[in-house]
Image (spheres, rainbow, N blue to C red):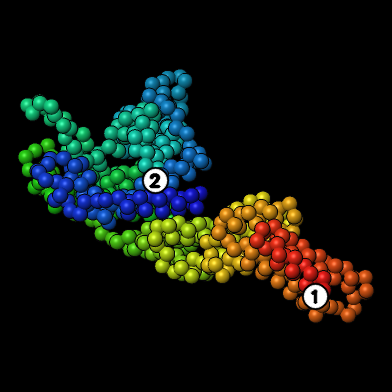
């Protein structure tokens, strides 16, 4: 999953980099507009840093949604048009003979504010259902499924909770065919007032931790969101980025207050409300590098995975750092991660981003050797794969690497496929074959030089047969290459002499 997520990240970063964006906000907003949504949309298109933060948030939400769909870890929420049905049942039977053990600590009203107002409890089963619902709502918001979160609230009989969640939406005036017809709006004309009220929920430690986190992330209150992140790198990064975006959007709207609210009282935030909000909700603007530093400090000693390290460098645009770190990873990383690095190098080269070409060559060579080392029975199922990756390393190393492949494929049925694959990939198969033959001859020379004097005559003869058979077998490579038949014959005669 981490590797797939990294490829998705690289794709969205590259797609944004090749898309043309306007250079200034003024070129997009050419006339006075009352719509916060239009203004903020123009801001995202013209502000590359803000657009990057939103792109990363979208990526984090998409990967979380995929993970949630794959694992199905969230508790199911049972649809019920009546909220707190068990509490309602207790209230309806009252003090009848069937309810002798009336719980005096239970609320006597069914409105959502009753537990706080009366300082009493709801039925324990309803409390559990509420906890499951709040956790599921947070999960849906974390996965970017805001509409599904609202639907959950309604299906659970808690439409009021769904209404609370929608207060963060930007105000937008719908287009009209008739200028004299009434204005229709979407979003919240009292968005700042909603935020100030939402802070009361986010700061209330008596509230459900996931409900506080949901309200906190929508209103830009980081402290209430962090406990629900549980030290997860992705969740912590998501929370910080969302809060940074919310703070910058709010700052932009407040700075453009006169433009946005010039003629519509419905879109005006009273000065006292604005002052209260700004005094209670203060967010320090951080760079992306600073965000990563803060996230690292909150991870409770956990270390980033190698994939997460690559993701961080990609987000920051530190391609050179990835290449430098790769040299340290080559010796100890898993084979699958080496494969990922090799393909990352190839993709970066296609994108024109390869600052340390020699390091990339070492990674690719490591991967090809890894593929060859997997061959164990003298056969190869897909020589085209190895041939292609061999062709990506420097020519001088291609001979040695492909000769290593030839040395490992000793079954004749597979050798023609190896030759054909090498030729199609542009590898100098003839040169590689000569290297393979030379290696076999060198093995014979070393074998004779290191002959153990304690060998019996039979053992020595068997060893000679093995070495000589390997040389003879290696000559077969030249016979499979049409323009090398004469050299194969010459080498054969030379060996017999």
Residue 315 in view in this figure:
yes
Left or right of residue 397: residue 187: left
Q: Give neighbour class at mark 1: few <14, some 14-19, many 20+ (Cα, 10 Å).
A: some
* Residue drawn 77% across the image and 77% down it: 446
Q: Residue at left 74%, top 61%? A: 476
Q: Is residue 332 above or below residue 28?
A: below
In the image, is residue 339 above or below residue 167?
Answer: below
Quarter-wise, where is residue 265 in the image? top left
Front one among 222 and 23: 23
Could you tell me which quadrant the C terminus lies in?
Answer: bottom right
Where disc 2 sits, the SS reads helix
Residue corresponding to mark 2: 61
Measured as percent of width and height from the top left, residue 16 is found at 32, 51
x and y, in percent, of residue 27 in the image: 15, 49
Figure quadrant of residue 116:
top left
Residue 439 point in image, percent of width and height: 71, 71
Q: CA distance from mark 1 to mark 2?
A: 61 Å
Q: Which residue is the site of mark 1? A: 447
Which of discs 1 and 2 lies nearer the camera? The answer is: 1
Q: Position of residue 409 (x, y in %)?
A: 71, 58
> Circle 1 — which element?
helix
Q: Is residue 413 left or right of residue 268?
A: right
Q: Residue furthest front?
A: 486
Camera-nearest residue between 14 and 484: 484
In front here: 489 or 282?
Answer: 489
Q: Please give the name of the residue rendered at 70% of the width and 71% of the height, measured from the top-left corner.
A: 438
| Residue density around tag 2, few if under 14, some if 14–19, many if 20 or more, within 10 Å | many
> Would residue 118 be seen by someone viewing this image from the given angle?
no
Q: Are marks 1 and 2 in contact (CB under 8 Å)?
A: no
377 relative to 396 in the view: left or right:
right
Is 101 situated above or below 479?
above
């Amino acid at each position: 999953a981490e590797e797939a997520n990294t490829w998705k990240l690289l794709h969205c970063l590259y797609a944004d980099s090749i898309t043309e964006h306007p250079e200034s906000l003024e070129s997009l907003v050419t006339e006075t507009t009352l719509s916060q949504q239009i203004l903020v949309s123009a801001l995202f298109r013209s502000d590359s840093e803000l657009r990057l933060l939103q792109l990363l948030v979208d990526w984090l939400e998409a990967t979380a949604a995929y993970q949630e769909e794959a694992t199905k870890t969230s508790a199911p929420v049972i649809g019920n048009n009546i909220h707190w049905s068990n509490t309602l049942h207790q209230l309806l039977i009252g003090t009848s003979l069937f309810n002798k053990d009336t719980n005096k600590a239970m609320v006597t009203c069914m409105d959502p504010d009753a537990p706080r107002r009366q300082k009493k409890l709801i039925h324990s089963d309803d409390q559990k259902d509420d906890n499951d619902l709040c956790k599921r709502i947070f999960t849906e918001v974390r996965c970017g499924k805001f509409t599904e979160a609202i639907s959950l609230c309604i299906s659970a009989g808690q439409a009021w909770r769904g209404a609370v969640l929608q207060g963060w939406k930007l105000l937008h005036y719908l287009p009209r065919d008739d200028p004299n017809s009434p204005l229709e709006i979407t979003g919240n004309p009292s968005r700042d007032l909603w935020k100030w009220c939402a802070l009361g929920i986010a700061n209330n430690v008596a509230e459900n931790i996931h409900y506080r986190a949901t309200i906190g992330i929508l209103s830009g209150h980081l402290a209430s969101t962090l406990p629900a992140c549980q030290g997860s790198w992705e969740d912590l990064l998501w929370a910080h980025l969302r809060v940074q975006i919310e703070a910058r959007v709010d700052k932009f709207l407040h700075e453009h207050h006169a433009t946005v609210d010039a003629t519509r009282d419905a879109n005006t935030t009273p000065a006292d409300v604005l002052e209260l909000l700004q005094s209670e909700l203060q967010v320090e603007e951080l760079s992306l590098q600073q965000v990563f530093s803060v996230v690292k400090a909150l991870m409770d000693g956990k270390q980033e995975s190698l994939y997460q390290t690559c993701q961080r460098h990609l987000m920051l645009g530190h391609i050179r750092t990835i290449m430098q770190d790769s040299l340290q990873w080559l010796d100890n990383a898993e084979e699958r991660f080496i494969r990922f690095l090799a393909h990352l190098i190839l993709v970066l080269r296609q994108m024109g981003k390869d600052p340390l070409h020699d390091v990339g060559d070492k990674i690719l060579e490591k991967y090809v050797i890894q593929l060859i080392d997997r061959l164990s029975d003298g056969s190869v199922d897909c020589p085209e794969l190895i041939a292609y990756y061999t062709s990506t390393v420097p020519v001088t190393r291609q001979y040695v690497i492909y000769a290593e492949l030839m040395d490992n494929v000793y079954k004749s049925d597979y050798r023609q496929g190896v030759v054909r694959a090498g030729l199609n990939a542009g590898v100098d198969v003839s040169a590689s074959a000569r290297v393979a033959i030379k290696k076999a001859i060198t093995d014979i020379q070393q074998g004779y030089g290191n002959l153990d004097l304690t060998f019996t005559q039979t053992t020595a003869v068997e060893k000679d047969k093995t070495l000589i058979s390997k040389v003879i077998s290696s000559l077969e490579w030249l016979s499979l290459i049409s323009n090398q038949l004469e050299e194969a014959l010459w080498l054969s005669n030379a060996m017999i002499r």
